[in-house]
Image (cartoon, rainbow, N blue to C red):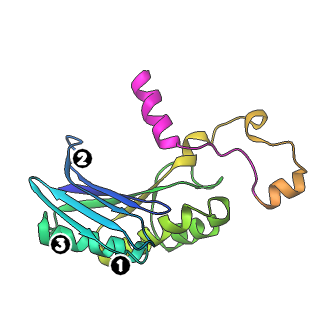
Amino acid sequence: MSVLVINSGSSSIKYQLVDPDTGEAVATGLVERIGEENGLIRHAYGDRVREIEGPVADHGVGLETAIDLFEEIGPSLTDGAIRAVGHRIVQGGKYFDGPALVDDAVQAKIEELCPLAPLHNPAHLKGIVVARRLLPDVPHVVVFDTAFFQSLPDEAAVYALDRDIADRYEVRRYGAHGTSHHYVSGRGA
């Protein structure tokens, strides 16, 4: 049993099929330069590597092609061998202080938070929508970069702005790369 981890970024998709017991990447892939003429999709499984060069219209096409490459190159995702799909999300606002199981309400909240991360959350959302459609029988879990910083005290998180405006537009210091900070601080400790 493996976990498919997807990072659907602003112009790329990175993914790994991970053995959750060992942390070993069983298969890896990358979709680069989405929306450009010279896109690249690369999928590797063992000693088998497949690269496709050419335009990748959008994140949906990129992720659909990546999922197809699992069937072509391996390992298959349709034989019940994956336990879950994990998605990295940049902006969880003040709503998510840890991982969340994706349902329609969580998906809607991520969409609502797009103005706080306009280059990232829309791409993450597209990855979630496509992955849920293509892999509907496994749970999808989201992990938010901003979750690590939820406990910042007000003196560190609040900007010197009019409170009504800051509250209305949810402007505060959310922090960045929280998943990395969480990992590094845990390893350092």
Q: Find the residue positioned furthest to the top.
A: 189
- Please state, as top left, top right, bottom left or bottom right, where the N terminus lies in the image: bottom left
* Amino acid type, label 1: Arg
Q: Residue furthest front?
A: 38
Residue 91 position, x and y percent, is 58, 55
What residue is rendered at 31% in x and 57% in y?
A: 15
Residue 30, position as x, y percentages in the image: 31, 59
**Comes first in the chain, label 2 or label 3:** 2
Residue 14 image point, x, y percent: 35, 57
Q: Position of residue 9 (x, y in %)?
A: 46, 60
The residue beneath circle 2 is 20
Q: How many marks?
A: 3
Q: CA distance from mark 2 to mark 3?
A: 18 Å
User: Magenta stretch: residue 172 in it?
Assistant: yes
Q: Residue at x 42, y 72 (%)?
A: 59
Task: Check disc 3 and report the residue beneath it.
Answer: 78
